[in-house]
Amino acid sequence: MGQVTVVNFIEIMFIASKLRQNSIAEYLLYMWQMEDLIRAYGCSLARIKREYINWFDFTDEQKEEETDWFGNLIRMMNEEGKRENGHLQINQVMLQDLMDLHLELLQSQKFPFYNSEYFKVLPYIVELRQKGDKDVSEIETCLDALYGIMLLKMQGKEITAETEHAVQEITTFIGMLSDYYKDPKTQEKLSETSLD
């Protein structure tokens, strides 16, 4: 795999902070990708530095920052028993925050467009849950679907038109949730709702 492909293929820590500010859903998907990348390298910081970080055209200082960032993620994965699978607690907390917001938005009368979008994707969520893990939240089901499609596309696998349509609907829904998550006015409106 050439350097240009790697740079276009995965952006690392420097992009993570921007994603976290702009779209919590994209950030979570990115962090899941980083968890899988770490697993692919056997949770070995030396391998990640040698075979991954060194591919990037970073300064020595940037490479050191990247190495520290991956080192911290590896340490957390080891401490939390996530070497083989699962998501880090920091990512689970953000996912729970998204799910809590999702439920609040559904209960409020002040977000009719969100409710409408939710009911558009609900049949896809139900179908996905029947095929997959029924014990995860609706939001995690949506993110799992988006992550799975991303992996299929990275592998060059074909996606059916029906699946592509479902993914577009889920993407719109999750994007809307992410926008509400970062918008400070959302909490104000929700607070007004609880006072009504």
Image (cartoon, rainbow, N blue to C red):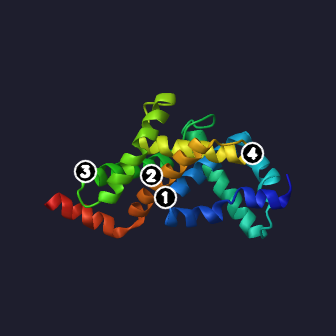
Q: Residue at x 63, y 37 (%)?
A: 83
Q: Which residue is mark 4?
A: 156
Q: Amino acid at mark 2?
A: Met
The residue positioned 84% from the left and 59% from the top of the image is 3
Q: What amino acid is found at the position of numbered circle 4 in the picture?
A: Gly
Q: Amino acid at mark 1?
A: Ile
Residue 179: x, y in percent?
43, 63
Query: Which residue is pictured at 26% across the width and 65% down the height?
Result: 189
Q: Report the amino acid beneath label 3.
A: Gln
Q: Residue at x 51, y 53 (%)?
A: 171
Q: Earlier in the sequence, mark 3 or mark 2?
A: 2
The answer to whether the residues at label 2 and label 1 have Cβ atoms under 8 Å apart is yes
User: Looking at the picture, does residue 115 appear above or below residue 7?
Assistant: above
Mark 1, mark 3: which one is toward the viewer? 3
* Residue 145 horizontal/vertical position (percent): 54, 42
**Pointer 2 local density, CA inside 10 Å: few below 14, some 14–19, many at least 20:** some
Q: Which mark is residue 63?
A: none
* N-terminal-most mark, 4 or 2: 2
Q: Is residue 101 above or below residue 145?
A: below
